[in-house]
Image (tube, coloured by chain):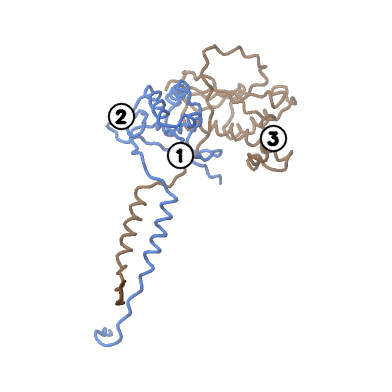
Amino acid sequence: MAKFKKDGGRPTPAINTSALPDIVFMLLFFFMVATKMRDKEMKVKTQLPTATEVEKLEKKSRLHYIFVGPPLNAEFGTSPRVQLDDAFATVDDIQQYITLKNGEKDEKEVPFMTTSLKADKSVKMGIITDIKQELRQVNALKLSYTASKEVKD
Amino acid sequence: MGSRRRDIPEINAGSMADIAFLLLVFFLVTTTMDIPTGLQVALPPISEEPPEDSKQKKREVLEVLVNAADQLLVEGSPLTIDRLQQKTIDHLTNEGKDPTLSTTSTAAIVSLKNDRGTSYDMYVHVYNELTAAYNRVRDDYSMQEYGKSYKDLDPQRDKDKIKAVKKKYPRKLSEAEPVSIGGE
């Protein structure tokens, strides 16, 4: 086995890393632009159904979110629950929630507010229908069944 | 001002990368990348008056029923989901040919009724197929008339064309109040 030379020979020059911050900043800006803040802590499981005819929802500021699904934490049972913002709610709370949220908005924007319903695949239509009825009661008529784009093979 | 010119010592930028990495990791963790997508629905407004008696002839209505076991019944006969889209297209573009289907595209109605026990997944699939059927017939009509597919029509410049297509194939998708037979 050859013995490593310890002394002598020229020392390797240090690699110039002055461009490294530029590269990292570029990555940073990419992620800042391409992503959005995770603003809600999910309490229910929402495995979205897939569909081919989905449309992109424009303007995130014009969205209300309603989550429906079985609780992630098994302590709360397995039957589907409604989540509004960060907390569990019931179907009866939806009217008040939408009214409250609409109150924070500009009056002109209210007719354009869309409700994004994120429901788990396994949920039965009973609870979904109840939610739809509540939304009709508060005149929140634009609804979107949130679904992920199905890739046709 | 400063009369003596001194060499400014170079600022050590070695830790800049560390700071940038720290920020990068922070944004990677706190952000999500998905753009929300979904099937758009316009709910009917609530009216106090009871719905008027449907004078629609039965042949104008394509009746789609979904039961609690996620099975489809279209016009009284079972159908698989992959054939629903074609059936709906046939109904919309019938123009009086088949005596069991619609007389004109403008009068054609699709009625969707589900059970409270129907799964959301199945409902979204059925809704998706019906939407797809409407999109397909509109696309075909637009292609035939204007040589452009419906979604390529410009909302500003081709306003009249979009209107014409919508008039030819109005989206009449009615949803009945669900029943509870199969249980939840």
Q: Which mark is residue A60?
A: 1
Q: Amino acid at mark 3?
A: Asp
Disc 2: which residue: A77
Report x, y in % for residue A36: 41, 46
Q: Amino acid at mark 1?
A: Lys
Mark 2 and mark 3: Cα distance apart in space: 54 Å
Is B180 rendered above or below residue B37?
Answer: above
Q: Amino acid at mark 2?
A: Gly
Specify the subunit that label 3 lies on.
B
Report x, y in % for residue A133: 46, 21
Foreground: disc 1 or disc 2: 1
Report x, y in % for residue A17: 35, 70
Cβ atoms under marks 3 and 1 closer than 8 Å: no
Q: Which mark is residue B133?
A: none
Q: Earlier in the sequence, mark 1 or mark 2?
A: 1
Q: Nearer the viewer, residue A22 or A150?
A: A22
Mark 3 and mark 1: Cα distance apart in space: 29 Å
Q: Residue furthest front?
A: B1
Tell me, yes or no, whether dots 2 and 3 are on the same chain.
no
| Colour blue, chain | A
Disc 3: which residue: B160
Q: Say few, some or many: other residues with alpha carbon within 10 Å of mark 2 (under 14 / 14 to 19 / 20 or more).
A: few
At mark 2, the secondary structure is loop
Q: Chain B drawn in what color? A: brown
Q: Say few, some or many: other residues with alpha carbon within 10 Å of mark 1 (under 14 / 14 to 19 / 20 or more).
A: few
